[in-house]
Each structure stands twice: as structure tokens, then as C-alpha cells.
Image (cartoon, rainbow, N blue to C red):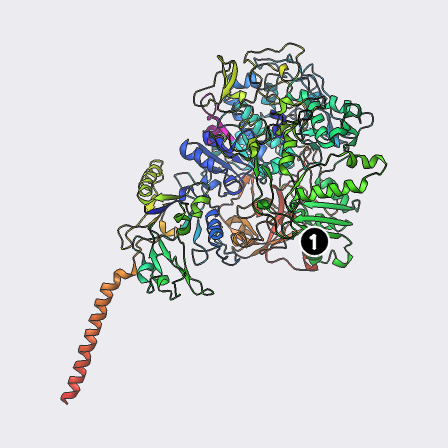
Amino acid sequence: MPGLGTSFGRGGATTAQSDLANADAILIMGSSMAENHPVGFQWVMEAREKNGATIIHVDPRFTRTSAMADIWLPLRAGTDILFLGGLINYVLTNDKMFREYVLPYTNLSTVICEGFRDTEDLDGVFSGWDDIKKRYDHATWQYQNVETLGYDEGHYGGGGHGKEGTGTSHPNGCERDETLQHPRCVYQILKKHFARYTPEMVEQGSGIPKEQFLKVAEAFTSASGPDKTAAICYSVGWTQHSKGVQIIRSAAILQLLLGNIGRPGGGILALRGHASIQGSTDIPTLYDILPGYLHMPFFKSGHNNFNDYILRHKSRKGLWFNYDTYFINLMKAWYGENARADNDWCFDLIPKLTGDHSHFGYWLDMREGKMDGLFVLGQNPAVGASNGRLERTALSKLKWLVVRDMVETETASFWYNSPEIERGELKTEDIATEVFLFPAAGTAEKAGTFTNTQRLLQFRELAIHPPGHARSDSWFMYHLGRRLKKKVEGKVGKRYEPLQKLQWNYKTEGPLKEPSISQVLKEISGWDLTSGKQVSGYKELKGDGTTASGCWIYSGVFPAENLNKALIRSPKNYLGHGWGFSWPNDVRIIYNRCSARPDGRPWSERKKLVWWDEEKQEWTGIDTPDFDKKKRPDYQPPEDATGTNGLAGDKPFILNADGVGWVFAPTGLMDGPLPTHYEPLESPLHNPLYRSHDTNPPEDKKIRPDNEYAPIGDGRFPYVLSTYRLTEHHTAGGMSRTLPHLAELQPELFCELSPELAADLELVHGEWACIYTPRSVIEARVMVTPRMRPLWVQGRTVHQVGLPYHWGYNGLVKGDVTNDLLPISEEPNVRIMETKALVCDIVPGRRATGPEALKQWKAHKEEAA
Amino acid sequence: MTTTAFLTDSTLCIGCKACEVACKEWNELGDDGHTWTGLSYDNTGAVGHSTWRHVKFVEAAPLLGFGGNAPDLASWTFSSDVCKHCEVAGCLEACPTGAIVRTEFGGVFVQPDVCNGCAYCVVSCPFGVVQKNSDDGRAFKCTFCYDRQKEGLQPACAKACPTESIKFGDIDELKLAAQVRVEELQSRGMQDAQLYDPTETSVKGLHAMFITRGDPKQYNLPPNPEVPTVYLESAWKSSALAAGVLVLGGLFAFLGSARR
């Protein structure tokens, strides 16, 4: 998400899935789209069948997606940046840049300040690296002559999900060299940074033979220019890495250089991990952001106030100029009349971050007994999170645990049937956690919206009431809030104020007294508090407290009393206008100003999307313009202009303060302005590029006795392990292993490995194997298949083993928990775990049961390498 | 009423099994047990009394650099198997109770309230589709979503298929579309693309046709499916001949002994 956010301005897919049908080439990487987004994949098939598009799939395994592709390349898990950097190098070396696009629409010509040093200068780190604090100071990454607030102590407590408003002034006149000759212009820095990502290096590091790499490079990069576009699709195969955000940055850079962003058949389709994860970052369940990608404020003495908070995040130019407006509207939605200018809009009532409160952040605190209670809603961390053993043991330290789900998940039952109980590590009678299991309503049993991977809100009406005591999450939260408010009524003290001042007057409907979701959605969309009328979009939101909106990017979804755009199902065109509401403003392909030339004409008839109508003096086209409708293409802003008026008519990336796509990201990321290849945290090999830094320097490994890592080249764990999903199951399996028609499709956990590895280790197809890592041991059925291939990397054979992660100890079909093998680690920006590349050992035979299993695992660990 | 048909184009199949599940959900079928077969990603095994759409997985070692859509090699293909709803159906011919009928849509339908579980249909199907459910006592197979078709809806599997690998519609239109598609695939270099619709055999063509790459046998589509009743004539003749020989032999034996 911050990968896309820093590059373009918004952390979300840049296009609609149906637009893939317009692509001339599609690269699917870090994803098995046919398996995990099968419905969206139909448009890849349309591109292939109707557009003659070349479909390229790069993946450690030959999957069902590879079976539909034209080209498949296996790569060593964890070397995505080598591959993508190789493509960037190919573009620069072979002059494949779409120059007419790149020069006006990106910061390729911008000059970076003098103090900047690249990883090529410093053997693997950028300038500003503090090896003791293990983090970067961004001061030397800034544009020449432009100041910005650097990252400091306090901010490090926060995460990277919020789009950095930069809090700076990026004047339109920051230094640029359109000839791209200046040694510190982004172009020259880029060239130097990726100079060693040659086809030979790609072969050496990732195992992809040079000729094959060149074949793909040519196929993809030639689908570029005024008449052609290419798209990239990725999913958690890219995000769940210790440098996941940078992998996505590599794709963003590539797509900017090729001029594919904001154009039909182009873009980057971030395929999210489940049906409404986009919604759960838009209206976030993340600790470090507020709805609409505003930042959670952090605690920093002296800066703990509204004015400093706004100063930090507001931008002089671009859409973030209105940061304070968006924030004030959110506070008005939450606190109603209680939020006023004279109390800083209840800013003091918002909790302030003091550290890492992400999943692993607080879970490790939980493990140390620092937490009393936990609500787990629609999540199953006992199976889904890394290092299951640590996760489940942590649960036993709670005083109380509330689980709301449709079935009794492994998280709810950990206290009597988890592997820890089986192995005797935990005893039921000794676990003091009081577990409350509440039945949850299913999707058809409640009203609400999903926001899917293409930023599309779709409202679902309630089809049938839930059975028995099952209730929706909104019912639960609303009534819990109501009861908590009642409990603190009349109490005096600052700690009660956030709850007392919360506006919680949703009307309820129906026999179960469900809160009115329509009312909630209207509040999210926003209204004028004086007239009581809905606003038509975020442009009508005011910063004086007269309007309220629960999420500015969703504003416009419910623009009038009886007009719920998320509920409408009358599609008018291939982009889907008339079906649901796509944020922002029902734009389907964001940054679509890029689909026209600087002068406003389309790049070509074939690839037209949005263009300037000289007669009507406005932007028009097939999509809603993601741009000020009336801004002329040749508009030049006056020096002191602010907001989007401060951006010229040929600056499409309106959330970035300089209006251009960021090939080089001066702010917003913790681990570098440019992506660099580092090895996964566990790897059989050293970083072929840099001797001093094998892994992503600011990565947090959370090393502890119950979260050990294997050092590079550890002989006990010689094989690369990657985990993934199957079509037939859903994430941790609660909704699929409990249903007979799905359970029978994939009834048992199995591992996939090559015939060569099977022969080496005497593993027999159909029998059992134990897979060991420094965290745990599991057993799985053996599937020997030529779809797994050994790779030749840095002069030796590297074998890869694959494991789907859907099984657990409950349900109709059970199996060991794959994620027990993974370590807990935190990528520096979003703190996501690394699941896609680690090391393992694999041995024929079944796992021991009970306490013997622990002994078996320890014995393997203690073996000499 | 137009005769409807399936055209299952396996070059568009992504192996997602939505067809299997949609069919089971619509028809409220049971599961097939939870056994891991190790046969690629196929754990339901075959069509039978509780699986009426079944995705076959055929693996061949992939070539480095080539995806499954490359003309050079179809490395991992998927095809959704189903009742063929034969033009001349072995099950229908064999059924002694008249339970199996031809519907107004041209499909072959087992009436569950008439079927007596004799299983004659089971041995008469050249494709091994229909199967008896020993717990229930009756024989079951794909109904061609007769109930849905009567309401003007397409079968559940066709509706669920995300890539339109399963095409449903008028049989003549689909036969034409199939030809066009095979030519198209072959022009792309896929010489192994072919249509499976055995019109030359006694089955006289299918109402569920398949486009596959490589040998159709891999997808449970036999080369010369025959309706067993074509052997009736020669079977009766052989029986008559055998009976005749036996009678003659018997007469000869008795007459011979009578003479002594």
C-alpha cells in the first residue's frame, strides 16, 4: 500500500479489473491470480482471447495461473526486486522509456539534494542510515532546495500506511533538468542504482536463465507507448516480504517509465488478500491510520496538539492541502456537536501512538502478559498469523478473549485442542483465559458494504435474518458502544471523555435492532450539518465544522437521501459506472489525466480514456476525470496558489505535492527512496549485490528464544520454503474447511516439491513428510510434481518447497498449521510478516504426536549442520 | 423448444471448480468423502451420483519459459467433465422402468420418483457417468439443470464459471462456435486442439461437447463410445445361433442314442 501511495498518491489498485481486458501485455507476479482472484481473472482471459495480450506469470511454482499464461518463469522466492530491477535496467539500457509521458508526469527530471548517497555508494544502504538505531534519516533524500519534516523519534512509533502529506512546501519550481543530464537528477540516480541489475545478475540471483528473462523483458516493455499499454497484477506474493513495499515500488517505477499508469489496459492492479481488505484499510482496522488514510497522531511531547499535527501532514499543494478539512469532518462525524474549533475538534480525545501497536507489536506484549483482554473479530490468528506457537501461547496470557465468528475457530478453541495442548506445552486447567465465543451473522444475514480490490464499494442488503443468537459485527459494536456509554454516564474524569463525547445515535431497525447501515454509510459519505442534506462529494466538505464525513475518500457514495450509489446495479460501460461506487468520486482508473497528452488530447484513439474538450472547456471521456474538471491542460499556477490550484494542468498525480508520479520517493518510506534487492530474512544465500547488507536494514526480526531465525547458509535448513493459497480454501480455513463441498476439494495439507528433490531425499508421492524450520515442525502429504523445479543460482542448485496454509485443528478436514513454521517479523513500513520466502528442511515420515513432537523438532534443531 | 447444449472449452478452464460446487449447492448433493487422492489437484475423482460436474486435471512437465497457453505444450490442463446427454443415450435405452427420459430441451433426465435402482443404466453408459447411490438406492446424474432451464435460467455450472469455459445455449449455435474456436486455436499453433463430439458412433453426437488439447482420453472422453444397444442385433443373432447349435447338438445326441 505505501508502495503505491508514495509513488502515485493513493494506496490502492490504480485500475478496475475489467480494464485488464484492454491490456496488450499483463505481468502477473507475486500472485496466482487465476487461483485466488478467479472472477477477476476472467478479464485477463479476455485480454488474452480478444486483445491478443501476452500473459506473463513469474512464480516459484507453475500454478493454475501459469497454465493460462503464455510465458512462465520460475524464480527463487524473495528475488522479485532483482527481476523487476532487471526490467528497469532493461528499459533504461535499451531506451524503452515512454519519454513523452515520463518527462511531464513523473519526477524523473527532478534534482535531488547534494547529500544524497545511493546504495551503490555505501555498499547496501542509502545516506542517512543509523546503524545503531537501525533506521534512516530522510534529510538527504529530499529534493534540491526543498525542506521537509524529517522522520524523528516520535514518528517512528507510527507506521507507513498513511500517505505522507510531506508537511512541506514543494514549490512548482523545484529544480528540474529536462535533459536528464544533471548527475543528481532522478534519472541519473536511477540508472546508477540499477546499473548492476543486468540479465546476468538476474540469472545469477534468481535462477531465471538470461534468454528467458530477455524474452519477457522484450514482451512486456514493447507493450508501451501511445498505442499500447501493459498492466501488472500482484497480490500477497509481493506484499508478504521483509521488503514487500519496495517490491511494489519497483513495479511502480517500471510502470511510470513505460507510461502505463492512469491509462486503459495499464496500471497496477493490487489484488488484495480478501473480499474487503481494501475497505479495512480505507476505514481502517490498522493501528496507524484514520479513515481516508489520515494519520493516527503520535505522542511526542511538545507536538501533542492539533496545530502541530496538521502542520506535519498538510501539504501546500495537491489534495492533501485539505488535510485539516478531512480530519475535522471525521471528528464531526465521530463527536458531533462536541467537536468544535475551540476544543481543537476533540483532537485530544484521539489516542496517541506511543510505539508499535500493530498486530505483532501488541501480540508480543500479550505474550509477556501485558494485556488483559482481546476482541478477535473475523480473524483467526491461531492459524493465519506467523509463528502459531507463539501466537497461541500469547492467548493463554490474557484474562479474557472474545471471539466472534461463524464457526468455532482455532483461535477460539486454542485452550483445549491446539498443538500446544497436544504437546503438553500448555495445559487446559492452567489457562486462566476466559474465552467468550459469539456466533456471528453470515454475509447474507446482514446489510453492509464490501470494498473490493478495485476500490469498489458494493452495498449488500440483508437477505435473511441470522439464526438464533448470531448477530452482525455492526450490531455487536453498536450495542457494546451503547452499553459502554451508559456505564460511563455521569462519571467525571478525562479518561471517560472519549466515550462520553462520542456521538452514537444510530437508529436501529428490525426485530434484532440492527443499527441502520444506510445511516452509517450516509454519515461516511458526509452531510451538511445545518441543512441536514447529503453532500455530493469531498469537494463540498468544509473545514469550519458545518459538514461531517466519516471518510473523505468515500464521500459521494450516498450523495442524496435515497441515492445509495453502492447499491445500484446498472452498469453503463465496460468500466462499470452505474455498478457500485468506486472511490474517489466514482473514478474507475485513477490518475487518468495521464491518459491524455500534456496538451489534453488522447495519446491515441485506441487508448483514449479522458481528454480535454476545448469547446466545453472541461475534461470529459469514458471515465470520471481524476482531475479538476475545469482546469485547462495549459494552466500554470500562480506562485502562492494552494491545494489543487497549486498544480499545473499537466500534473496528474494530485495527491503528491509536486503533482507528479514519484520514481524516486523522497519521503514516505522507512527503507529507501528506491527499491534495492535484499535477501529474505532467511535465505540459503548471501546478497549477490552487497556484502555488508544481506537483508533489508530497517527490518525488525523480533528475535527472541521462541522466534529464532536460521543464519544464511544454515545446513540444517537447506531448502527455500514458500507458502501460498489454493482456490478451494479461504485463508485460515474457517469458512471453507467447515463446509463439505469445499472441504472435499482439498481435504489434506500437502507440500509440493520437484521430482529431483524427491529423488534426493527419498520422498514418495502420496506419503508423508515432516517440514522443519527453527520455529516448529509440521507434517504434510507429499506431492511430487514437475511444476516445481530446482533452480541454478550462484553456482549451485536451490530447491524450493511449497506449502498452502489453509489447515488447522478444527473443521471437517484438519491438518497441521503451516504458519507455525514462519517467524514473526515486521517489514519496516507496514509491519507485515514475511511468508513467501524462508528456509526449511524436509524429511520423509510422519510427525510424532504429543510431547514427542517437541522432542522431534528440538532434536532436528540441535543436529550439527 | 430449442435443444440446448453445453460446450465445455477446456482451453478457458482455470481449474477453479466453481462448477462442481455450484452444481452441488444447487442440487443439494452430498460430498464424496474427504480423501486426498494425490492426483494433481483432483480430490473428487470422477463424476458419479454425488458429483455431476468434475474438473479433471492433466499434468505434463512444463517447459521453462512457457505458460500453458503456449502452442508448444499444454502443460497443465483442466476440463470440467459432465454427463454428455448423448443424442442416443445408452442409459435411456437400457432403463427398464422408463425413469430416464429425454426432456423438451434435449437433455437426458433421470426421474428420481420413477427410478427403482436396478442400475442397468450404470453399465450402459459408455462414459461411466451415471452411478447408483447405494445409501439412497437410486441412480443419479446431471439433470442438465432441468428445473432451472424450465424457468429460463442457465445451468448452475455455466452460471458460476468465471471464464465462460462452460458455454450453454442452442446446440446448433454451439456446434458452430466450437468449429470456429478449434480453427482459431489451431491457427494460433495449437495443432493439438480438437473438438470432442463423436457423431460417427452409435451415440450420434453429444449435447455436451468438449474442446480439449491433446488426446481426449486424458479427459475421460473415450475414442469410440458406443451405446450398448447397438450390439443387441448381433447379440440376439449370436444367441439365436448358439441356441440353434445347442438344439441341433441336443437333437443329434438324443437321436443318436435313440437309434441304439
In the picture of the structure, the residue carrying the numbered disc 1 is A414
Q: Is residue A194 visible?
A: yes
User: Residue A537, image x and y in percent?
Assistant: 61, 25
Q: Within the image, what quadrant is residue B165 found in? A: top left
- The crowd level at tag 1 (other Cα within 10 Å; few <14, some 14-19, many 20+) is many
User: Residue A591, image x and y in percent?
Assistant: 56, 23
Question: In front: A835, or B138?
Answer: B138
User: Does residue B217 sit above or below A178 in this rendering?
Assistant: below
Q: Is residue A158 visible?
A: no
**Furthest residue in direction right, as rendered:** A492
Total marks drawn? 1
Q: Is residue A104 left or right of residue B83?
A: right
Question: In front: A121, or A577?
Answer: A577
**Furthest residue in direction bottom, as rendered:** B260
**Furthest residue in direction top, as rendered:** A638
Which residue is located at x 49 percent, y 12 percent? A614
User: Does residue A606 sit above or below A431 in this rendering?
Assistant: above
Residue type for callout 1: Phe
Q: Is residue A801 left or right of residue B86?
A: right
Question: In front: A505, or A191?
Answer: A505
User: Residue B149, image x and y in percent?
Assistant: 39, 48
Q: Is residue A433 left or right of residue A279?
A: right
SS for dot 1: helix
What is the quadrant of the N terminus of chain A in the image? top right
- Stretch of the chain drawn in magenta: A214-231
> Magenta stretch: residue A403 in it?
no
Which residue is located at x 47 percent, y 40 percent? B64
User: Residue A141, image x and y in percent?
Assistant: 68, 21
